[in-house]
Amino acid sequence: MPDAPTTPHQWRFFRAGGFDQVKLETGADLLNLDQLDQKLWVALACPVHGLHFDPKTAGLIDTDHDGRIRAPELIAAVKWAGAMLKDPDDLVRAADSVSLDAIDDTTPEGRQILETARLILAHLGRPDATAISLPDIADADKMFAAAPLNGDGVIILESASEDATRGIIREIADCMGTVVDRSGNPGIDQEKADAFFAACEAFDAWIRTAQQDAENILPLGDRTAAAVAAVKAIHGKVDDYFGRCRLVAFDPRAAALVNRKEEDYAPITAKELGINVPEAADFPLAQAAPAKPLPLDSGVNPAFSDAVAALRENAVKPILGVKLQLTESDWAALQAKLAPFEKWDAAKAGAPVEKLGVPRVRGILAGSGREKINALIVEDKAQDAAVSAVAGVEKLIRFVAELYVLCVNFVNFKDLYAGEVPAVFQAGVLFLDQRTCHLCLTVEDPARHAAMAGLAGAYLAYLDCTRHGGAEKLSIVAVFSQGDDDNLMVGRNGIFYDRHWRDYDATITKIVSNPVSLRQAFWTPYKKLVRVVEEHVVKRASTADANAGAQLSTAATAPAAAPAAAPAKNAFDPSVVALGSVALGALATAFATFLGFLGKFAAWQLPLVVIGILLIISGPSMILAYMKLRQRNLGPILDANGWAINARAKINVPFGERLTEIPHLPPGSTVDVSDRYAEKTAVWPKLLVFLFLVWWVLALLYDTGVLNHIPLGKSSVGLNQNSTDSSKPAVTNNPAPAAK
């Protein structure tokens, strides 16, 4: 029978930032994340570092250890944690400890974790404890690490209970080196032990080869090595001596050159010489002559007298008998006799254990040391399950405490938009220019970050933050989403508080300029005009000041001269009058045109016309700012920090006002407006504004006819009724009586 179709999980969503985000309210929501279309996830990857999230917990989630947490890794972490708990809702509660009753012991892994947790608590002297936390795990790590057998496959001296086995462990460490045990002490592992016993076997086999053919390989027994060493020590010089003798035998004329000339001795005889004359080491071993034997007692280069004596006593005498001279044939026979030993010695095996000596090596091989060492290593590795269970307990505690926090900053951005707690990527709070910026992120390379983050359409300020005189440094980017940018510039200083409220001196180093608010956009054209006028005035004033200074300097340095004749007056140019008339005419025409344009409107409409002109000037700037403010997006800012944002997380105006706060007086505050340093203001501007408002109200009432219907008294009413047309005679219903 086919399996009945399973009911799909019912998801709930909330809208924030202009898009729908899934609600993660229950453990079932978390366990079914693998069923949620990843197109509905806010993020698909995030970096391990640079977050307000325990890096060790993040490292446990990052199973491939590439420095990034991806959606499949987060799903796997949630699945594992949910399988270890009886109630997956414990993940949503995000407690700092795990109740022992909450661990699901129906699976082998869960049962091992529960037993290990109880063992840890019992070791801490709290066998009746009902919950376990991270501080308990820290002590458990020390407990297992300090144990002689701690599951890492490394044994130390304390791992063995017998002195003989400890001795072998010590010898292995001495010959093969050590590895660090989990406890931090030096020890040996299986690789070191195998290499040691293999070296013992090779060394023993090498020794047995010489013993089996001792007549050829060890002609002098234990003294053969000394004889070979004596021959090797002077082998080159002896060969050189007999070569020189052969050359002189070939041509006697070479004798003077072969035995060195007299002037060759001058450099070494000019200074103080030692007894063995080491300065003569480059000279021949003895004076060469045709077929001349090598003297072994006298007539030898003093630099090699000791080496020749060792050759005579250790090699020549035991093999060739007592000789005071060594012929070339004797030299060849001596080398031939020792050649098998040299060949055997060159094939030496097991050199690392040679210092133990043959008896000790064979004693180790004959005993049961190897079996005991291997058994200890196997026993140590058997503890790995318990130690791994400690890691499992720690992993479960960390996931219960922190996994949900990552989910609501990865699958959705609940923490960011709810505002109750900062999101994991928010580094702290920046106070600058009477504003508080809550959306601050740490950055490693501001230039590279700005290349991507600039696409967010937000006003970004990059700041270098230092603390304790520069001992602690970090770089941040802050989003300004309210106010204006008049006082924001490179070099401005503020204070940055990190998530632990540690203060840093913050200095703006780079700005990515974008509109901050519609208010700023309205005044931007006028600010630009004022700025242009100010720059022009300053430029003209600077030029005039420079010219005046140059003239004064010239006048001060020029020699006194006779008064110059007054320049002749130029003849009057009538064209000046003509040009002035044209200019005045143009101005009058323009003014008349403007007055004619204003004359088309009623008096009360004129202020509205002025407002309309202002809107025409500021409108394009405001429309452009409005479009950019609607396009502000958090995605590029986080993408530049290594995130993979999967949604368009908008920073609209209301949300931007929460991310950047401007100052407000506390409720119930009072303000003393008397400012002893306030600038004195004239009364007439306020009077003009008041009169203008009165005039505008009267003009509005007059043009709309309101004043015509306001009763002004009896006489006024009668006048108003009878003065309809003053040019016509008044009509009466009571004519005057006729004359009689």
Image (cartoon, helix red, strand yellow):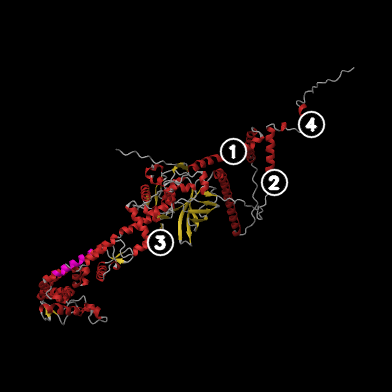
Q: Amino acid at mark 3?
A: Arg
Q: Which residues are magenta?
A: 194-208
**Residue 543 horizontal/vertical position (percent):** 57, 51
Q: Which mark is residue 714?
A: 4
- The residue to which callout 2 is attached is 684
- Count residues near mark 3 (Cα–Cα under 10 Å), then give few for <14, some for 14-19, many for 20+: few
Query: Label 1 is placed on what type of residue?
Result: Ile
Return the disc, 4 or 1, that comes first in the chain's sequence: 1
Q: Residue 47, position in %: x, y?
A: 39, 51
3 vs 2, front mark: 3
Locate residue 41 relative to residue 176 in the image: left or right: right
Neighbour tally class for label 2: few under 14, some 14-19, many 20 plus, Cα within 10 Å:
few
**Gap in angstroms between the C-alphas marked 2 and 4:** 39 Å
Residue 18 seen from this side: yes
Residue 313, picture quadrant: bottom left
Question: Mark 2 or mark 1: which comes first in sequence?
Answer: 1
Measure the alpha-carbon separation of dots 2 and 1.
26 Å
Give yes or no for contact between labels 3 and 2 (Cβ–Cβ under 8 Å). no
Whether residues under marks 3 and 4 lie with C-beta atoms below 8 angstroms apart, the answer is no
The residue type indicated by label 2 comes to Trp
**Which of the two discs, 1 and 3, sits closer to the camera?**
3
Label 3 vs label 2: CA separation? 84 Å
Name which residue type carries label 4.
Lys
The residue at which mark 3 appears reads as: 126
Say whether residue 558 is left or right of residue 137.
Answer: right
Occupied quadrant, residue 123 = bottom left
Circle 1 is placed at which residue position?
A: 613
Q: Nearer the viewer, mark 2 or mark 4?
A: 4
Is 282 left, or right, of 605 in this rendering? Answer: left
Sequence-earlier tag: 3 or 4: 3
